[in-house]
Amino acid sequence: MRAIYAGSFDPVTNGHCDIIQRAARLCDELVVAVLSNPAKVTKFTAQERLDMLQEICKDMPNVTIAAFGGLLVDFAKQQNAKVIIRGVRSAADFEYEMQMAQLNKELDPDIETLFLPSDVGLTHISSSFVKEIADFGGNIGFMVPSTVLNKMFEKNNKL
Ligand code: PNS
């Protein structure tokens, strides 16, 4: 089974990394797809997000990293992936994820969404809080891999 794990990954967090590792164990091949949407303001460019994910996943032989624009179901089809993986942290996530899964199912009935419950110790982590805390000089070391920590420090301190 070839699956897709898509997201903004702005930046990738320990929560995302946990889902990547677990999804990679479940499927034969996992494509981690980074949303590249020029209309959306992001802290990290698509290339920076791709590079960080490449580094983090470099020892995972069945994981590839790609950028995509447009509809996720179209990209999944293009990649010959029949499954979309989504991590779910909370009831609030579930409502949004359910709506997205149902819409994606309407758009392409051949593609299924699988939800993975987030690890109990990682439910409070989100990319937006990582950025907010880092912008105010707080510690984000417990929320992101070291590659992201270094890149965030570089960006915020314009090194
Ligand atoms: O990490 P995120 O930001 O929660 O990921 C959301 C993402 C990228 C999976 C979602 O916004 C998406 O699929 N965007 C592509 C456009 C699309 O297919 N929209 C219809 C969704 S029902």
Image (tube, grey):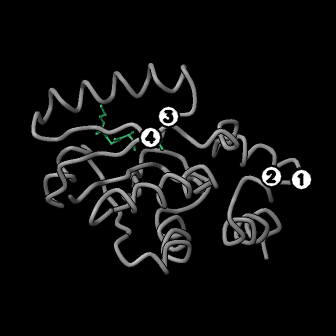
Quadrant position of the N terminus in the picture = bottom left
Q: For this rendering, which residue is in front, 100 or 117?
A: 117
Which of the marked residues, 3 or 1, is nearer the chain's N terminus?
Answer: 3
Which of label 2 and label 4 is nearer to you?
A: 4
Q: Residues within 10 Å of mark 2 (few under 14, many from 20)?
A: some
Q: Is residue 24 above or below residue 147?
A: above
Which of the marked residues, 4 or 1, is nearer the chain's N terminus?
Answer: 4
The residue identified by callout 4 is: 116
Q: Mark 2 is on which residue type? A: Ala
Residues under numbered marks 2 and 1 in contact, where contact means CB atoms less than 8 Å apart: yes
Which of label 4 and label 1 is nearer to you?
A: 4
Estimate the spatial distance between the alpha carbons at disc 3 and disc 2, rounded to whole Å. 24 Å
Estimate the spatial distance between the alpha carbons at disc 4 and disc 1, rounded to whole Å. 32 Å
Label 1 SS: loop
The residue identified by callout 3 is: 88
Which of label 3 and label 2 is nearer to you?
A: 3
Q: Is residue 64 above or below residue 11?
A: below
Q: Residues within 10 Å of mark 4 (few under 14, many from 20)?
A: some
The residue identified by callout 2 is: 134
The residue identified by callout 1 is: 137
Label 3 SS: strand
Quadrant position of ligand 1: top left
Estimate the spatial distance between the alpha carbons at disc 3 and disc 1, rounded to whole Å. 28 Å
Which of the marked residues, 3 or 2, is nearer the chain's N terminus?
Answer: 3
- Give the residue drawn at x 49%, y 72%: 57
